[in-house]
Amino acid sequence: MLCACSGEQFKFDEQQQSPESLATRDFSASGLSSRTTGDWESKLEVIQVDEAESTLKEALSLNYEEARALLGRLEYQRGNLEAALQVFQGIDSKVLTPKMIKAIVERIHYRKPRSKGEIGPPSVMSMHSVSLLVEAILLKAKSLEELGHHSEAAKECRIILNIVESALPNGMPEGIGEDCKLEEMFHKALELLPALWTKAGLLDEAIASYRRALVRPWNLDPQILAGVQKELASMLLYSAVEARHPLPASPQSSIEEAILLLLLLMSKVARGEIKWDGEIMDHLTYALSIVGQFELLAEHVEQALPGVYTRAERWYLLALCYSAAGQNEAALNLLKKVSGCSESKNKPHIPSFLLGAKLCSQDPMHAQEGINFARKVLDLADHQNQHFIGQAHKCLGICYGNAARVSLSDSERFLLHKESVNSLNNAALNRNEDPEVMYSLGLENMLQRNLGAAFDNAIVCSEMMAGNTVKGWKLLALVVSAEQRFRDAQTVVDFALDAAERIEQFELLRLKAVLQIAQEQPKQAIETYRILLSLIQAQRDIQAKNPEQAHILKSEVLAERNLELAAWQDLADIYTKIGSWGDAKICVDKAKLMEFHSPRSWHSTGMLFESQSLHKEALVSFSVSLSVEPDYVPSIVATAEVGELLFLWFVVYGIFLYSEGLYRDWTAVPKRWFVLRRWQGSFTFFGHELETCRLPLGWFKSSQNAKISYLDRLGPCKRLVISQRKNDCPSSMMAGGTPVPLRISDPQCLWRSSS
């Protein structure tokens, strides 16, 4: 008991359980015992507490409150919480608060060196007494907490903060805790108060308490301060409470405040002020993912000190960040490092291979790399990684299908289609409850024109999703429309519209308009597009009023913009077909204003000119479309048709013969052969090797002996000379013969007329 006056610190967190307590011990000579039962028990406890207080006061010359504080601390240390609480109830904190505030203020203003025996003015409470009473209030709060009275405990703990904040409005000065325990008790109260409010279910009060601990410099230990900041950030992120900061120039939302706190903690970690804490990185990952700041997240992953992550883990996390930011090429380059020679001696990182297969499945040009990634996953999967097998088979099947669609060989395409279906069926066996697998299988069957199997897959997918997403309904509508059942497909779309979210509603509205066009209902389609564009404009107005959320909805804004562009292009085609050229031009201009370098917009311009019999202007527009995307099949076919009307036979033959897009898009092959057979007697072929020049497509010269030169960069230089003079045609190219197409591997074929 005497050590309280010497400033010795007690560890009251570890309680010693004892069957007896000082409050129930017999301090009198009457021999009364705490084991007495009946009506005398409560009276005896009160009498014994009073006798204990008298003994302490006489032995130490303490006042009433200090004696109770010491007695209550002893009871708490013995584990007698109810007895300690009974002792602490006798301390009137409301009466003592002004005296304690005055004592602390006097201590700060008159900090003169004193001898141990010297005491302050009798009217001012000593700092040791203040520390003793503050400790008593804190122990009372902890006793209430352990007895389950969290709200009352928080109110008691708040008294300590009120006292210290009133006395020290500018924060805790240095050296105040050298000869007393006030600073230590206050720091424990700062940590305890938010936890008490959280246990009481009052999250607003808990957030306010965390902010209260951070708003002033309280000389907290850096690690403890970091813990308070981390707890506040996590509560702001996960509590679902939007608690605006009361101070001016403060963050606009709870998420923004949490991100600032976490970024501050990461900077402390980078400077070595605090230890690495994986929870900070987890919270920051979640927060930045919500707001779409994946590039910033990648920067902090790169700043992690060596040893925190292995190289494979770091590359994998960076790839996740870049892929989420839409930079799939950068993500794939990082994942290739994981499978490179530098990591051959380390343990294979299967999640990296699986992510690489997934990213490659989204781009047909990386189909072969995706196949390699997926095969690595299947080869490395063991009993601990069985859950990866189904996902690997799914990615493998999608990559096989993409590879088939870019293949130039019919036999190779057939084999790839077969492998695609087999892999997706294996995925369905391993993940028979995964609707994404059934969706991919149904989509692949539909693209291969296996409409019966695709319809069954779409039904199963819709049943698995149970109306939670419209992907299944959309797939079903596409399959039904492929069977020329447009009315049924429109019914499916109308049903899906009721369960769709905003961006999904926009996609379904466009699909509905396309189905109406297929049913030759242009007026209904125009009305559907009008509704779609008005909804997109209304959504844009809402986003303009909330600019702070623009970065959060970045992906949705991009999707809405692409849908709006497609809607204007579709409207231009509709107005062109019904002969409303003025409206068609307005729509085309709108589309070009949104995306000038769009091959479809220039193709729609060419179709508008062609409908007005302006064939030369149409040819120029189609040429611009092909200069943007050389393998754009609609412009390829349209260019050949216009070339026929203008008697530019070399354009027709060259376009159809050397465009790889027609080989990849096998649905266009029948028309391609039909056009070639119509003009097979109008060309002359010479197999001489001559000089080759390359100029932009569309730079043509109509002459009687027009010639075309083409350089196959992957093979020998060849020259194709085509003449319009029928007399120069060999007999093998005359009517009745079958033209043999030349297989050119360079899609960037560029033409010119030469003398």
Image (spheres, rainbow, N blue to C red):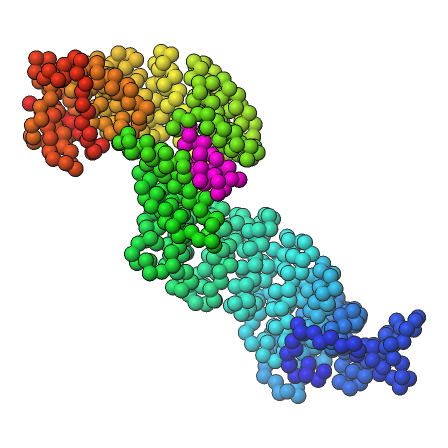
Q: Is residue 74 above or below residue 641?
A: below
Q: Would you identify the image quadrant in which residue 341 lies?
A: bottom left
Identify the residue at image location x=59%, y=59%. 210
Q: Quadrant of the N terminus?
A: bottom right
Left or right, 307 with reference to 248: left
Q: Is residue 99 above or below residue 427?
A: below
Q: Position of residue 513 (x, y in %)?
A: 45, 21
Q: Would you identify the image quadrant in which residue 604 lies?
A: top left
Asked whether 155 or 166 is in front, the reply is 155
Asked whether 592 or 63 is in front, the reply is 592
Q: Would you identify the image quadrant in which residue 748 lies?
A: top left
Question: Magenta includes 535?
Answer: no
Left or right, 111 with reference to 475: right
Q: Position of residue 586 (x, y in %)?
A: 36, 20
Left or right, 415 with reference to 233: left
Asked whether 689 or 214 is in front, the reply is 689
Residue 536 seen anywhere in this rendered image of the structure: no
- State which region is magenta: 424-446
Identify the residue at image location x=57%, y=34%. 466
Question: Magenta includes 431?
Answer: yes
Q: Position of residue 682 (x, y in %)?
A: 14, 15
Q: Is residue 694 above or below residue 172?
A: above
